[in-house]
Image (tube, helix red, strand yellow):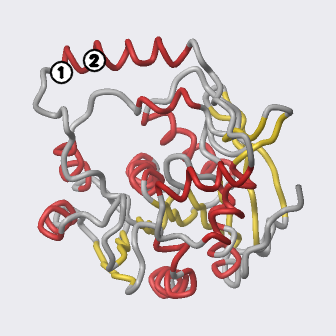
Amino acid sequence: MTEPKFPGAVPPERTSTVASVGVRLNVLEWGDPAAHPLVLTHGMWDHARSFAVLAPLLARRFRVIAVDARGHGDSSWSDAYMWFMDVADIAHVVRSLGRPTHLVGHSKGGGQATDAARAEPDRVIKLVNIDGFGPPALPDGDRPVPVRCAEFFEARRRLAQRRDWRPYKTFEDLVERRRAQNPRLTAEWLRYFAFHGGRSASDGWRWKSDPFMANGFGPWQPEWIAPSYRTLRVPMLAITGSEPDTWGPLPEAILAERLSHVPQLERCTIRGAGHFVHLERPRETADAILDFLGH
């Protein structure tokens, strides 16, 4: 199948790998290798090519490095997907650069980039979090933790017995599955995204991502987010869209309370964008990021 085209999407100029906690992370790069580095981290079920429009805009000034998280894209699968392991992966990528860097993350990648900045304050200069501030609440959050733990491990056991996706008959079926999750995104973008996030076989199309991730990261409470922000030692730009979407933004009262714990905070709302701010309004998002990061 020929690669679908999307206006503004630029193939990476370089590819490499970084070893981290038992996996091989796929790394894509845009921009001058001698320029100051900026690391991009994506959301759950996404991949590094989701930055193919934003990255070249940021590469006007930076060496831009986008990482396929473990179990996503062309990075290898893992035996476990705990939150701290993804944070360690980001930290390993940052360390591999040999100089301080900026971090820019979206959704889950925004939350994990924030934790990586907390863990590596001497290697991170500034942080941009794009709508990665956690859910408002969990549907089972008031149930006893031992019960939630038991159900979590039982679900892991069942998933471990099926470490692959059931195939979609056609590529367009794969695209339609993603459209159901992200109805605001254009058909052109969804086809580009699915092509790089899927793989074909004799029986149809499957996602490259590991279905073992479907059960999440284990029992956890959203109330833990705000206190963790207090230990952030680098400036954060918090970006959200103005439009209600499947995955955000948070109600302002909840978001403002969480962000009130960030010691050095700037906020930016991108008009006309939902949760996938950098896909719907890439130029406005790039301008906000570049203005925050400075020269």
Disc number placed over residue 192 in the picture, else none: none
Quarter of the figure with the N terminus? bottom right
As drawn, the label of residue 145 is: 1
Residue at 46 percent across and 54 percent down: it is 113
- Element class at badge 1: helix
Q: Secondary structure at mark 2?
A: helix
Image coordinates of residue 255 in percent, x first then y, are: 20, 65
Residue displayed at 63% across by 48% down = 93
Q: Which residue is the site of mark 2? A: 149
Residue 233: give x, y in percent of width and height. 33, 60
- Dot 1, crowdedness within 10 Å: few (<14), some or many (≥20)? few
Q: Residue furthest right?
A: 2
* Residue 33 rendering spot, x and y as whole percentages: 79, 69
Quarter location, residue 75: top right
Q: Quadrant of residue 127?
A: bottom left
- Give me the residue at 42% from left, 46% from top: 119
Q: Given contact means CB atoms under 8 Å apart, are the residues at marks 2 and 1 in contact? A: yes
Which kind of residue does numbered mark 1 sit on?
Val
Give the CA separation, mark 2 to mark 1: 6 Å
Reply above or below: 198 against 70.
below
Q: Position of residue 177 (x, y in %)?
A: 56, 50
Most foreground residue, 292 or 101: 292
Residue 268, picture quadrant = bottom left
Vertical placement of 30 versus 160: above or below? below
